[in-house]
Image (cartoon, rainbow, N blue to C red):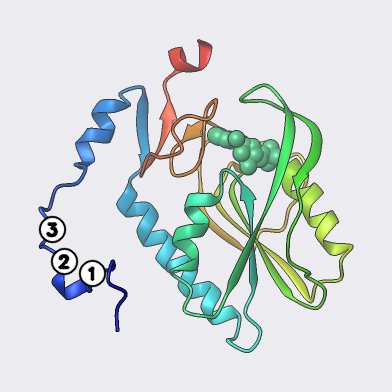
Amino acid sequence: MYPMNLSRAEEMPPSSGEGFEKDDFRQCFPEVEVLLTAEQIQARVAELGAQIARDYSADSPPLLVGVLKGSLVFLADLMRAIPLPVQFDFVAISSYGTETEHTGQVRLLKDLDTKIEGRHVLVVEDILDTGLTLSYLLDLLRTRQPASVKVCTLLRKPSRNKVFIPVDYCGFDIPNQFVVGYGLDYAERYRNLPFIGVLRAPTLEK
Ligand code: IMP
Ligand code: MG
């Protein structure tokens, strides 16, 4: 039986069909030039999920470790594209520098809640830029004797990498431009865009 205050799905009124239109986001954020559409991202996330599901087994599925806050949207979509009994957890890492430049100093703000000894860990990142954030995180995770550690990043800027990070799954290689949307921010804005785009220069100079 259903509790009195919960409606059964079949009794819900039909949806009015009202929702956002694709153009609403474009109109609200004209300073963002689309680089990857929501459809392109969803198609690639589905491929990555299928590939990950093939590489692991249901007996020892990976623990997905998202790096806050940027990987939130990607992780949410990715885990629903992996038909395995995966679990997830988050770390938060701060990098010092300006909004768009990394100084190389990194600090752990939030650790995992989960013990990873003997487990397969899959780190999920929004973007690999200099590689300094992931280098720090991978070193830290390896001290805890996980069964394996792999990396899945949605985006990679190849020419910017300062440290070599072995990437097992990569969504897109992108040019050396500052991008926002789908979890990625500029001054905490733009994370809710369903697409990924390049910020036009005047916005960055503000
Ligand atoms: P890395 O340590 O230089 O590889 O940078 C990692 C972090 O910097 C990412 O997780 C992002 O939060 C941020 N970042 C790097 N490039 C961009 C970008 O183009 N747009 C938004 N955030 C970025
Ligand atoms: Mg950021």
Three-letter amino acid code at disc 3?
Ser
Q: What percent of the width, then of the height, locates residue 85?
A: 55, 80
Q: Within 8 Å of ligand 1, the CB of disc 3?
A: no
Compare residues 204 and 162 and report the one nearer the observer.
204
Alpha-carbon span between mark 2 and mark 3: 8 Å
Residue 60: which quarter of the image? bottom right
The first of marks 1 and 3 along the sequence is 1
Asked if marks 2 and 3 touch (Cβ < 8 Å), the reply is no
Which residue is pictured at 35% across the width and 29% down the height? 33
The residue positioned 73% from the left and 53% from the top of the image is 165
Q: Which residue is mark 3?
A: 15
Q: Residues within 10 Å of mark 3 (few under 14, many from 20)?
A: few
Frontmost residue, 12 versus 191: 12
Q: Is residue 4 left or right of residue 181?
A: left
State the residue in front, 189 or 48.
189
Residue at 61% from the left image edge and 81% from the top image edge: 56
First along the sequence among labels 2 and 1:
1
Do we see residue 131 in this rendering?
no
Residue highlighted by disc 1: 7
Residue 118 in view (yes/no): yes
Disc on res. 12: 2
Please give left or right for residue 116 compared with residue 205 in the image. Answer: right
How far is disc 1 from disc 3 in space, using C-alphas?
Answer: 14 Å
Q: Give residue 121's position: percent from left, percent from top.
A: 70, 69
Q: Residues within 10 Å of mark 2 (few under 14, many from 20)?
A: few
Task: Give the residue displayed 86% in from the left and 71% down from the top.
Answer: 145
Amino acid beneath label 2 = Met
Q: Check the image and report above or below for 2 versus 162.
A: below
